[in-house]
Amino acid sequence: MKFLFFVFFFLASLNAFNVEISSSEVANGKTVLFVLEKEDGVKYKSLLYKDKHYKVLQHPLHQSKMYVLLPISYYEKPSDKKVKLLYQEKKKEKEKTYFLRVKDGKYKKESIQVSSSKVHLNAKDKKRASKEYSEAMKVYNSVSPKSYISSEFIAPMTSKITSSFGKARVYNDTLKGYHSGTDYRAKVGERVKTVNDGVVALVKDRFYSGGSVVVDHGQGIYTCYFHLSEFKVKKGERVKKGQVIGLSGKSGRVTGPHLHFAARVNGVQVDPLQLMALMNENILNKDTK
Ligand SMILES: [Zn+2]
């Protein structure tokens, strides 16, 4: 009897709360979603992954749920990882461990020829590019506690995708990182739309990305629109999904006009289309309970 009680108690404590993980396997450059059911007496705090805390946030559509987006860096090597959920139960600090397998995204390689002045930067350009990088990182690393979104993401343009996220990039025969976003075919002057509601966090002409707009969707989600020829919004402005934020162009380090569309989650660059599909299916789909 005592033993049975123990077994029951053990199982009950294992199922103390309900956590749904979008996948236990994830490729580098992709995002994993944790959805948690709120429980009486339980206060979720954060997910701990590789010494970084990812705050558990209020679900934008369901008052009874919370969620965390865990972005996996493109540079993460295939391996088995531990993710710890830190929470408070009856004022006691507790944790629960989940296992996550990071697999190889098997991204293709791509060779690009650009003018050598854009590969080998002079001191002035180097200084400018690094200043712009830290300025943008400051934006990406700040998490607005409230979500601005309440419905599904849309694409920034309806044209053909000419280059997908993650391709390893070889500039003038030297490997220099990877394609950090999704490219849409565009001539100079085509309308570019924000993929969801948010607040404009950055409007600037930058060395690499040219005419750049960054939209804060709240709760650590940012989308970026690069190489624009014209801005249609100002920093700090509230924008609605589908609103034109600028016109496409060929500014910055590019070989021709197109839209480079990118996303950041909690500071980490991720595949924007996978992130939006993940959110649309699991968080923003009004049919899911
Ligand atoms: Zn691009």
Image: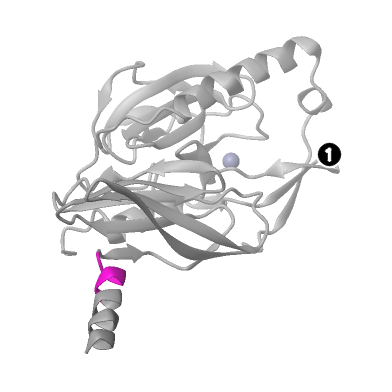
Q: Which residues are magenta?
A: 12-16
Query: Residue 87, relative to residue 230: is it above or below?
Result: below
Horizontally, residue 63 falls left or right of residue 153, namely left
Between residue 266 and residue 150, name the one nearer to us.
266
Query: Residue 110, relative to residue 79: is it above or below?
Result: above
Residue type at the position of mark 1: Asn
Point out residue 93 in the picture as x, y percentages from the top left corner: 34, 48
Residue projecting furthest to the right: 173
The question of residue 14 being in magenta is answered with: yes
User: Dot 1 lies on which element?
Assistant: loop
**Image quadrant in which the C terminus is located:** bottom left
Q: Quadrant of ligand 1?
A: top right
* Quadrant of residue 144 within the rendered picture: top left
Between residue 5 and residue 243, name the one nearer to us.
5
Q: What residue is disc 1 on? A: 172
The residue drawn where x is 64% and y is 63% is 79
Query: Residue 117, relative to residue 25: is it above or below?
Result: above
Residue projecting furthest to the top: 124
Between residue 244 and residue 284, name the one nearer to us.
284
Crowd class of label 1 (few under 14; some 14 to 19; many from 20; radius 10 Å): some
